[in-house]
Amino acid sequence: MKAGEVNPGQIINDLLQDIKSLKQEDILTDKHRKMLGEAEILLREAQKYHIRSQTAQATADAKQRSRVDKAVVTRYQRDASDNAYKRDNAKSQAEKILEILMRQIQEMAGE
């Protein structure tokens, strides 16, 4: 990682911690708990893809340093970018769910 770059894995872990603390709130309805569960599943999936992406990128870097055939390196780089895309997609879906949930909780608290 370069200086100033945000680590997607850390963001995912932070969101999972937020969900864990939100689950302990008394104000939540069953619908909210279900939304939290969906967001948690998506974030766990994003976490899985993050690890796969890092592993594939590290393998691609190692293969590139060892002067392996360019096609092999490209395959690992493609795997890394595919997994990063899946990670980002799952994370953004979870963030949307959490955004809706937070808005609903704020509306309930305001009533």
Image (spheres, helix red, strand yellow):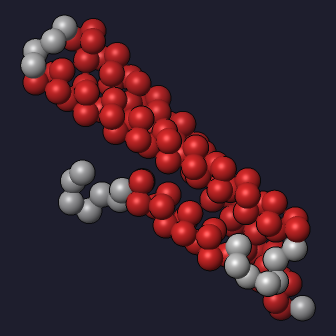
Residue at x-position 73% and y-position 58%:
37
Q: Residue 93: where, in percent of width, then height? A: 66, 50
On screen, residue 38 above or below 20 = above
Residue sitting at the far front: 24
Residue located at (87% from left, 74% from top) = 29
Side of 76 where 15 appears, left or right? right
Residue 23, x across and y down, in percent: 71, 73
Q: Residue at x 55, y 65 (%)?
A: 15
The quadrant of the picture occupied by the C terminus is bottom right
Question: Residue 75 sits in which quadrant?
Answer: top left
In the rendered image of this protein, does residue 58 appear above or below residue 60? Answer: below
Residue placed most toward the observer, 93 or 27: 27
Is any part of residue 25 visible from this angle? yes
Label count reads: 0
Q: Residue farthest to the left?
A: 66
Q: Position of residue 45 (x, y in %)?
A: 58, 43
Q: Is residue 26 above or below residue 11?
A: below
| Residue 93 in view of the camera | no
Image side of residue 93 versus residue 62, left or right: right
Coordinates of residue 19 in the picture (x, y in percent) = 63, 68
Q: Residue at x 49, y 39 (%)?
A: 49
